[in-house]
């Protein structure tokens, strides 16, 4: 399909053994006999190391489904998207998981502690990717390239800038979830001292500075390979940073959010004609005008039990006929909706709003351990828009790419920033963007609105973006995750739901790293 998707596995396999995660996750050194001089001896080596940076977002390791770059976590659970998705979804009002695997019950309740394996996993996965980027940047300086007689300096400079974007994104995830993580760049010497902790305001400044520098250096919107970052990806991440700034640094930056969402919207993007096609295996062809940045999966070459393989299989069971989802031997029966999500649609049959893609007839959630206790999701499929199944090794793995950033989210961010008082936009334009989303959902102007409120935006974000790993961050921004003003089934560990403490707007740093690194102070409340 494209160079990145076809070759990401090669870079991952060749570079996987160069860097490994151990207890001090940001203080890594090679753990075997492969040296940087061997890996970076020619341009091909630099390409492979660059691919490993992207590969760390979509693979668990270089050795197939049973391999992982991370220690202390099951390989199948160590994929970035699976970890991030679980944290964003299970702690929210949208999703419940019937499994009793380690870490899941507390996530369902929104009360994970510092020993939760998913918390350890996402923290370590993000830091592992940061470590790969730092190593690549150290080894691709002009001095190193000259010493190795590498002549493709312009290509490698592009690689460096994209790697910096990936690092900024991973630090944004860490800042969003944990607030105050350890912090290391390529300027720090490895193997010397334990990493220092960075506070949220300083990390915000770092991410902002990096992205503002990169917006002039990456490829123009839609001019890079599909799946690789460009200026629009930078602008989208800046939009997210600014929209949540009041949470992160207690300072509103809604005007800046309008500025950068406007840049994305002017970048040549358009909503896909079909909402359903965004989540089908050939979305790279049918929905490329809406997808700004994707995580690319290949169910034959880079299969693992995370990513869209996890999302598809965990939301269906045999009753739902897995072959209709492009995974004929799959169907794990784990994640379904809380009653809150389908009720956000009113008529959740999909007869009016085509985004409502549910299966089943029991909307309530009485038994946490029963997959059919609540409506199931049929949104994600390893199927092409033509009706053919996507590529799948063994009939379980998915080749569906995950749309990490897409235009509909940008439209909704613009509208929210206007409502929250940002300047440079207009309410009329915000309503117009929301109506474009709703016209696609309804197939006509039936769903058009003439006024906007913040409560409507939060509900519309759920209708448009459900099960896409947005919800925890959204609820925190709207003041709805913690406290008692908004309750959903099983929040706080009771069927009726209950208040949870405000400190849970931040996740705890993993106990293992706090113990290993005396420079770290645990987040309040844990």
Image (cartoon, grey):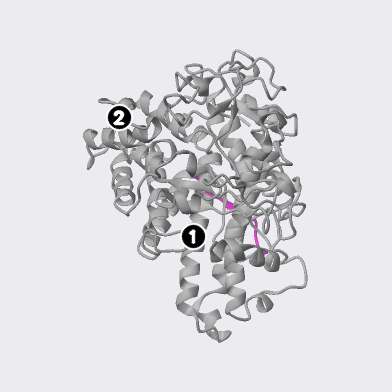
304 or 28: nearer the viewer: 304
Q: Earlier in the sequence, mark 1 or mark 2?
A: 1
- Relative depth, front residue between 289 and 408: 289
Label 2 residue SS: helix
Q: Where is residue 520 in the image (x, y as percent from the top left)?
A: 62, 46
* Residue 203 in the image, given as x and y percentages of width and height: 47, 49
Position above or below: 47 against 229:
below
Q: Position of residue 341 (x, y in %)?
A: 51, 24
Per the rendered image, the range of residues in magenta is 191-199
Name the foreground residue: 139 vs 39: 39
Which residue is the site of mark 2?
445
Task: Count how many numbered circles sit on residues in the image.
Answer: 2
Q: In the image, which disc is placed on residue 170?
A: none
In the displayed image of the protein, which residue is found farthest to the top?
496
Q: Name the residue under label 1.
A: 228
Kindly report which numbered mark, 1 or 2, lies closer to the viewer in this rendering: 2
- Taking 270 as reference, is 354 above or below it? above
229 in magenta: no
């Amino acid at each position: 399909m494209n160079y990145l998707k076809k070759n990401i596995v090669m870079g991952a396999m060749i570079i996987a053994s160069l860097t490994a995660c151990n207890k001090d996750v940001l203080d890594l050194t090679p753990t075997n006999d492969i040296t940087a001089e061997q890996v970076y001896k020619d341009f091909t080596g630099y390409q492979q190391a660059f691919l490993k940076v992207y590969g760390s977002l979509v693979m668990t390791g270089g050795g197939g489904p049973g391999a992982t770059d991370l220690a202390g976590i099951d390989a199948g659970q160590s994929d970035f998207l699976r970890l991030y998705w679980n944290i964003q979804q299970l702690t929210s009002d949208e999703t419940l998981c019937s499994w009793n695997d380690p870490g899941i019950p507390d996530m369902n309740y929104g009360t994970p502690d510092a020993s939760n394996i998913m918390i350890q996993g996402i923290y370590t996965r993000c830091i592992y990717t940061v470590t790969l980027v730092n190593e690549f940047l150290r080894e691709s300086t002009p001095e190193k390239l000259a010493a190795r007689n590498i002549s493709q300096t312009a290509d490698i400079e592009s690689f460096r800038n994209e790697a910096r974007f990936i690092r900024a994104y991973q630090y944004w995830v860490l800042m969003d979830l944990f607030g105050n993580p350890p912090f290391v760049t390529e300027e720090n010497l490895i193997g010397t001292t334990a990493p220092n902790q960075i506070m949220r305001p300083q990390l915000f400044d770092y991410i902002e500075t990096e992205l503002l520098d990169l917006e002039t250096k990456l490829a123009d919107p839609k001019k890079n390979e599909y799946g690789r970052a460009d200026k629009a990806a930078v602008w989208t991440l800046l939009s997210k940073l600014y929209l949540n700034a009041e949470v992160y640094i207690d300072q509103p930056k809604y005007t800046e959010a309008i500025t950068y969402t406007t840049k994305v919207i002017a970048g040549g993007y358009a909503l896909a004609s079909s909402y359903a096609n965004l989540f089908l295996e050939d979305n790279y062809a049918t929905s490329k005008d809406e997808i700004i940045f994707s995580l690319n999966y290949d169910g034959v070459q880079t299969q693992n039990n995370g990513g869209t393989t996890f999302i598809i299989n965990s939301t269906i069971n045999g009753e739902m006929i897995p072959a209709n989802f492009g995974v004929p031997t799959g169907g794990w029966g784990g994640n379904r909706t809380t009653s809150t999500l389908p009720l956000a649609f009113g008529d959740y049959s999909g007869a009016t709003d085509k985004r409502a893609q549910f299966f089943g007839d029991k909307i309530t959630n009485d038994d946490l351990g029963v997959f059919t206790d609540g409506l199931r999701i049929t949104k994600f499929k390893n199927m092409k828009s033509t009706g053919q199944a996507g590529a799948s090794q063994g009939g379980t793995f998915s080749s569906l790419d995950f749309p990490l950033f897409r235009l509909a989210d940008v439209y909704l961010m613009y509208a929210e920033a206007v409502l929250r008082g940002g300047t440079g936009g207009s309410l009329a334009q915000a309503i117009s963007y929301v109506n474009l989303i709703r016209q696609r959902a309804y197939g006509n102007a039936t769903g058009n609105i003439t006024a906007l409120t913040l409560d409507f935006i939060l509900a519309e974000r759920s209708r448009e973006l459900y099960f896409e790993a947005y919800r925890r961050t959204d609820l925190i921004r709207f003041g709805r995750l913690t406290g008692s003003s908004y309750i959903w089934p099983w929040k706080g560990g009771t069927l009726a739901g209950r208040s949870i403490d405000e400190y849970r707007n931040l996740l705890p740093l993993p106990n293992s790293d706090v113990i290993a690194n005396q420079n770290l102070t645990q987040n309040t409340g844990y």
